[in-house]
Image (spheres, grey):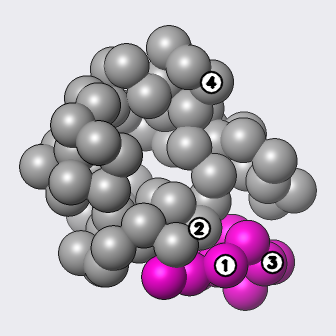
Amino acid sequence: MPIMGATLLKEIPWDFIAPHEAQAQRNHGGQTLERLAQRGGLGASEVVDILQGARWGTHRPCIENEQWLVSKVNEWRMATQSPA
């Protein structure tokens, strides 16, 4: 999923955001994640809203939200890595 206007990341893994499809649709007028990606993606603060089950606009664009998102993506990657 492309991340628009962020400094710390340009995209997040699809499998990371996909389980939150229903909240994304609630926040974005029924648009699917696929449609949102086609339209350019989401802002980091929009992803934070989706992941936390908050309504659109609860979190404002700021570096702290980007840092939180980077941390959550890193945690997800560590948890989903296959053992060697």
Q: Earlier in the sequence, mark 2 or mark 1?
A: 2
Inter-mark Cα distance, 4 to 1:
19 Å
- Give the residue furthest to the right: 7
Inter-mark Cα distance, 2 to 1:
6 Å
Look at mark 2 in the image and give the residue it sits on.
Answer: 45
Q: Secondary structure at mark 4?
A: loop
Q: Secondary structure at mark 1?
A: loop
Mark number displayed over residue 40: 4
Which percent across, then down, holds residue 53? 24, 75
Q: Secondary structure at mark 2?
A: helix
Do the numbered discs 2 and 1 sit on residues whose CB atoms are within 8 Å? Answer: yes
Q: Residues within 10 Å of mark 1 (few under 14, many from 20)?
A: some
Inter-mark Cα distance, 4 to 3:
20 Å
Residue 3 in which image quadrant: top right
Q: Earlier in the sequence, mark 2 or mark 4?
A: 4
Look at mark 1 in the image and give the residue it sits on.
Answer: 60
Q: Earlier in the sequence, mark 2 or mark 3?
A: 2
Q: Amino acid at mark 3?
A: Ile
Q: Earlier in the sequence, mark 4 or mark 1?
A: 4
Do the numbered discs 2 and 4 sit on residues whose CB atoms are within 8 Å? Answer: no
| First to last magenta residue range | 58-68
Towards the viewer: 46 or 65: 46
Q: Amino acid at mark 4?
A: Gly
